[in-house]
Image (tube, coloured by chain):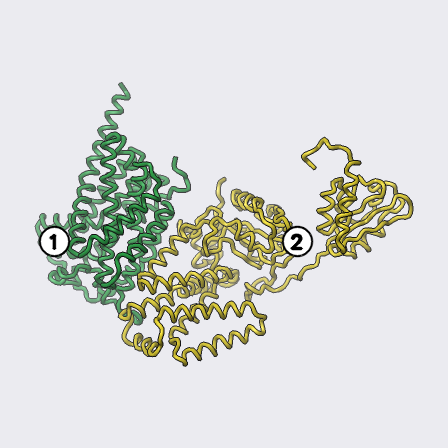
Amino acid sequence: MINKNEQISPFLVFFLVLKVQIGVGVLGFQRLIIKSAGNDAWIAVIAAGLLFSIVIWCMFTLLNSQKQDLMGIHTQLFGKVLGGFLNMIWITYWLLMGIAVYRAYVEVVQAWMFPQINVMTFSIVFALLIYYTVSGGFQVLTGICFLGVIIPSYLILTIFFPLEYTEFRNLLPVWNHSYKEIALATRDMSLSYMGFSTLLMFYPLIKHQKKANKWAQLANILSILSYLLLTIVSIGFYSENQISRYVWATLSFWSIVEVPFIERFEYIGIATWVIFILPNICLFIWAATKGTSVLFKVEPNRISILFLVILIVMSLALKDRETVNTFQDYMSYVGFILYTVYIPILLCLSYIMSKIRKKTHEN
Amino acid sequence: MKKFPFQKSNHSLAPQFDEVIQQLKESKDFTIFMFGIEHDTLCISYFNTLIDTDILHRDLLPYLNKSSSTLEAAVSALPIENLLFTQKPADMQKHLLTGYISITMEGKKDQAVLVKADSQKSRTVSLPEVEFSVIGPKESLVESLDTNLNLIRKRLPIQELKVEELTVGKLSKSRVAVLHIDGICNKKNVSTVIQRISNLDVKQIIDSSYISQMIVDKKNTPFPQFIDTERPDRLAAVLGEGKLVILVDGAPHGLLGPATLVEFFTASEDYFLNWTMASFFRLVRFFAVLFSILITPIYVAILTYHYELLPKNLINTLVISRSGIPFPPILEALVLELVIELLREAGARLPTKVGQTIGIVGGIVIGTASVEAGLTSNVLLIIVALSALASFTTPVYQMGNTIRLIRFPFLLMAYYIGILGVAISFCFMLIHLLRITTLGRPYLEPLYPPKLHSLKDSLIRLPFSLLSKRPAPKQKD
């Protein structure tokens, strides 16, 4: 059914999951969680990470038992009409996620580098890039995910620059916030971990699917560790008041990076972020495209052109920071429900259905 | 002829032998003469420009039995191996055109003997000029396929080294040899290459580069997919790694493939030096290539949009060097890049001695003059010259050309959206590289898909004791 050459080895799932988990959110996730959980924000980071570890486990249990992608599971469990409707929801979610990530990046560029950038032309160039990637197939997509982790990984070294000014006593006293505050921060943090739902689409393209869970979990652990590191340094580096004014706390770290021949390192960082963000957007667009082309039996390349036109239009329509923010809040809310409520329910349903089917089969 | 096995009468073929000879006789350099005393005269014909007349005089004429009544008897005493007896005129024509002497017997024109006597005029094996290395073997391929095969076989005296030969080109009838080592090389690759070569429908194959352009997986890319080398030692080395080699008669370069991107940055010298030095030089090469592609676009991006990226002292230098220059950075950079290309092109077309003059005129006179005239900034001049220099570090000539070409889209994008444009172009390049395959294998291997054991000999080269595994693993097919 699926060409063996198109399949990827399971350890590449590590990069696919890591890539979507660490995206544009890294640049400024600190403000939200520190706002509600203060110096205990790091607990929220771990809590949210563990929560998503369970979600990943749920996904793999579901996929391993069904041996097909989400589209197939929906149609099998709910029939063509209802299943198709649910598929539409997920496709829309992926498309909008792609747009949200892209728009967030444009926002960063506008705020830090190019206030006057022509969003239209930039979007067209970027859309061409996305099209070139997505039309190359899943192998190319995995490749850019892999390189998208490896090439920008040098940026992790920049964490040493703020360390000099970090006051780790800011972390104390531990646990001086209520459960509610930490839970709120956990919910806000979860937006950063989201994105690996594309796994539901590329699962059939993994070679030894049973082994992939391990790699996905490892990727999740690595994202927890990187977010944790950033959160702890942020708590130590900024005061609580200060960070509430910094929308992109990670980017502000880069402002203090000093290299003899570079004055404003954040420019380099933001440019490198193109390679970082591209696979992220491409994965969402790819998942949406694949879903639609299976659902309506249309050629995928045409769908992706349509989606990219939507991407350009939407990124123009989301004009100012306010609308972008509201849009992202909605997306994170929907995403939170999809991941933590929808997936477990789907897992239960699939379990019950398979039991019933077994019984009817035995009878 | 094989199509009509029932056509048994040899007599009906006899006039065709004459016909062939009549046709060939229209060329001035075709010689035909009778040889013998009595009625059974031997008729000897050949192209005197194709054969070695020494062989004719020394080994052929003295040993012909003039008085025998059959052709077999007449040539039985020849001290030459491999006499071809043929009854097919087409066969005779083909061989005559490749340096054989044909002997027929007057009155019994149903059979001809073909004696190989082609003159082996070719260059002697000399020093490699394109891929010179200070240490290591100093032989390079020549235009003769047989000499080249000899050079390679000498280094691999094993029976597993197989040579398959094909003839390509309606006019040139070039001999193309595909070499591989049985048991190491992927059989599928061999059959793919042979299939693609034999499917070629062309008039002439002048050089091996014709073949390499025609049989690649992806034709619309500036990136070469076969390594073109003139070093037989390199060819022998990669044969052992499971690659295949294509040699073309008349071409002093062999092709080796499937070649991945990293291999275009490996020089044979990397293996002659100690691994620490080899790794260092290889890293220098990769850095040079990245530098060469990115530095001018970054200059344009910074000077067009992001002055603030540079520290105060550095920006001072830049501003001073650019003050009074009437052109925007992009125009300045494009013009200078084109000037470098111009110099390179002019240098490549001119004979060596004049070429040196061009170097001096171009490099020193034009450069200094344009800076003094205030047309270009001297910082950019340094940058452009350095990036041109860096592009020449690639051990494979074609890759150097590629690197010089792909910086132009980078430049335009840098002008368009600054440093983001450079990043986006870089992504385009990465995705382009990811999409290329060479003989069905990913071009970026072993970087992606990551192959740990091949990484030992990619960006760096680890000592031989760690390289015991072959980089290209045998595929089960």
Q: Which mark is residue B146?
A: 2
Work out whether B355 lies above or below A83.
below
**In the image, which lettered chain appears yellow?**
B
Q: Is residue A298 visible?
A: yes
Work out whether A257 lies above or below A359.
below
> Residue drawn at (21%, 45%), measured in percent from left and top?
A52
Q: What amino acid is found at the position of numbered circle 1 in the picture?
A: Ala
Q: Using the image as rendered, state which of residue A168 and residue A24 is in the foreground.
A: A24
Q: Quadrant of residue A170?
A: bottom left
Q: Nearer the viewer, mark 1 or mark 2?
A: 2
Q: Position of residue B282 (x, y in %)?
A: 45, 62
Q: Label 2 is found on which chain of the structure?
A: B
Q: Which residue reaches farthest right?
A: B38
Label 2's element? helix
Q: Colour of chain A?
A: green
Work out whether B363 lies above or below B99.
below
Is B441 displayed left or right of B319 in the figure? right
Q: Quadrant of residue A69?
A: top left
